[in-house]
Image (cartoon, coloured by chain):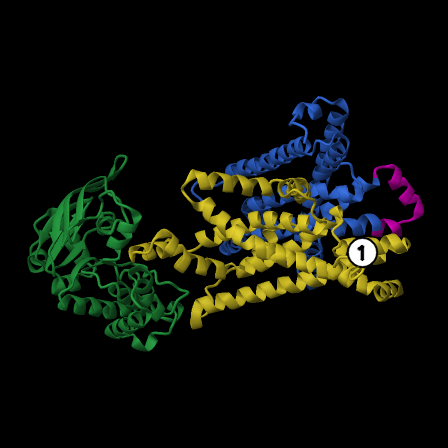
Chain colours: A yellow, B blue, C green
Amino acid sequence: MNAVIDILRDNWLLLLIGQYPNGPLGGIACTLILSVLGIVLAFPLSVLLALARMSPWRLLNAPATALVYGVRGVPLLMVILWVYFLVPLLIGHNVSGFVTMLCTLVIYEGAYLAEVVRAGIEALPKGQMEAARALGHSHLGAMRLVILPQALFNMLPSMLSQFVSTIKETTLGYVINVPELTFAANQINNQLLTKPFQVFFILAVIYYVVCWSLTRAATALERRIETKRAGPRGRLGAAQPAVVAQAIAAEP
Amino acid sequence: MKGFDLMAILLNPEFGRMLVHGAQMTLIIALGSWLLAMSLAIVLLVVRLAPSRIAGRVVAAYVSYHRNVPTLVQLMLWYFGISSLLPDSLQAWLGEHNGEAVFAIIGLGLCQAAYFSEDLRSGLRSIAPGQAEAARALGHSFIGAMRHVLMPQAVRNAVPALVNHSVSLFKNSSLAMAIGVAELTHAVKEIENQSFRAFETYLLATVMYLAFSLLIMAGGAWLGQRARIAGAR
Amino acid sequence: MITFSNVNKWYGDYRALTDISAEVKKGEVVVVCGPSGSGKSTLIRTVNRLEEIKSGQVVVDGHDMHAAMSSVQLNKLRSRIGFVFQSFNLFPHLSALDNVMLSPIYVTGVKRGDARERAMQLLERVGLAAKALSYPAQLSGGQQQRVAIARALAMEPPAMLFDEPTSALDPEMVGEVLAVMRSLAGDGMTMMCVTHEMNFAREVADRVWFMDAGCILESAEPAAFFAKPQHPRAQRFLSDLRSH
């Protein structure tokens, strides 16, 4: 236990922000920035993919479906390798590990979120679209004013849960030398060499605290949303909060 | 960039060997950890159902740890961390006998057991509440009710989630690369380093992974069909 | 106002509507009744093309609803017909007032201030001005359905369609919705209602259409229909209703 405290005391700055300002921003800061950017950029992509998946036109439906199934059927490491290879080709010059990881996360999370969005839209009662069309709204108008506002609001807890998954996925940046938290921990281990268990124990605890708090927040958010939807006459008796259900269903 | 030449990879005996060996390793890790995860998940479920509150808390903590700590970090903790705590003789033995793969199977298996046990638990909870009562009213014991009435339904309900997580488990085998296991993704990187044909190599690996994922999903769908009770929801 | 000419709808061997020819005149209130599965809901949904037809014509206020047309034209025509659903279908993320204001603003292009004023008037008309800022989850079923009626009226349609408007309501709330429908009829609105509420039909309707198995078997004035139905199936339907 003393070893743990010593390691923390000597290396907390490295774990927090990496080698900044003597190097790029790293550590927890890098992990969190990467995760936030990843999910924020993935979100619009996921809405487009979801709408394309639900469209009756083959031209939109087929490539969207292919992308979603392709990305979900392949390990994240494989997607990283592809992006690492293709992005410099497409842009014309080399990009940093951080940018590569960001692009990977946007594509990967975009595909997963697309299914969450699609489920959210399809979970709405059919009568909503019918009522909107009966009043004279166009399909896209109905989507914009009636369907998407409801679906996206209902899905906030699921998206928070997906954000937690994104944080866990950033650890693979280690493989392409992105200076995030896992990379920082490995640096410490390579310096110390004698206390690997303590170092990785600290690493596990940090991730645990971050992810656990966010998951708790997501569950609390979901309870508040359900209460608001059900009105003052009480909750509509869900057997199990959907966020927990989705976290169970999510990728480890 | 050189022209697209798939045959340069496929026909090269060295590369072919590496691919096959990598795929074998992937399958061994995936299968090994799946068996470990399933058995442990059933144990966890039974423990959780026991009347003791401590048992419930222990299992909940186990699940919470494995769901909130990234899988890669778990593997590192096993391979770098826990192995260093083992007695030297055991460490030496493991070093000679593919210790990386052993730790990969243990790490992935224990992690996935948490997800499988939650799937089974959800499956159990989604059974209509009257079922357990009806079984007891007819005179079944707790074990009997579980065996004949509840577990069959729980497993049926849990099949989609279990299949999903099995695909995740299969894909997570690639993480073993980070602790030095020569599985498929590792082989792919090696081949790419030597041949400089990234596109063809990655394409081959992608096709192989996709084929297997789809195979598992199709198997799951078939299981789901077989398990379907005529007319049930 | 609403004319059906030889309307047919089928799926494979199943005939949902067979050779329907009938008319709802301007200012008329027509009640469509019959056993479940008779095609009454299908028929009323063909009027604003929520259901397609295989042959025949449905003409509303001079417009052929099932002619080939762009979706822009269809949206415009739909905005000119009011439709009230059995399950209300209010938009839960908007207050009652916003529900009523939404479509005049975004479909017809009414200015926000004018739309709000008209919406408040309509909510007052259905007796819910006090609930303007409430959300659907906070309203009872009867209140939600009255807001739905106001929402449809906000588009100022020349005709209103009601698809079993009270079937999903608890019995004590049926009266408040029927009262609104009664007052609409009294003001001369052209209405086509699918309903099981026979007292309403008796007191408010100008004509009753009895449907079974996709056909209109009898069309008569309510007094005549309820006193002496002609068609044997209509007789059986009414006697089944009375035996409750």
Mark 1 surroundings within 10 Å by alpha-carbon count, few (fewer than 14), some (14 through 19), many (20 or more): many
**Whole-percent x, y for residue B162 in the image:** 60, 45
> Per the image, is B95 magenta?
yes
Q: Mark 1 points at which residue?
A: A185
**Whole-percent x, y for residue B120 in the image:** 61, 50
What secondary structure is marked by label 1? Answer: helix
> Per the image, is C105 magenta?
no
Residue type at the position of mark 1 = Ala
Residue at horizontal 67 percent and vertical 50 percent from the top: A99
Q: Nearer the viewer, residue C34 or A55?
A: A55
Is B2 rendered above or below residue C223? Answer: above
Q: Nearer the viewer, residue A225 or C202?
A: A225
Q: Is residue A114 left or right of residue B28?
A: left
Magenta highlight: main SS: helix
**Whole-percent x, y for residue B79 in the image:** 82, 47
Q: Which residue lies furthest to the front in this view?
A: A92
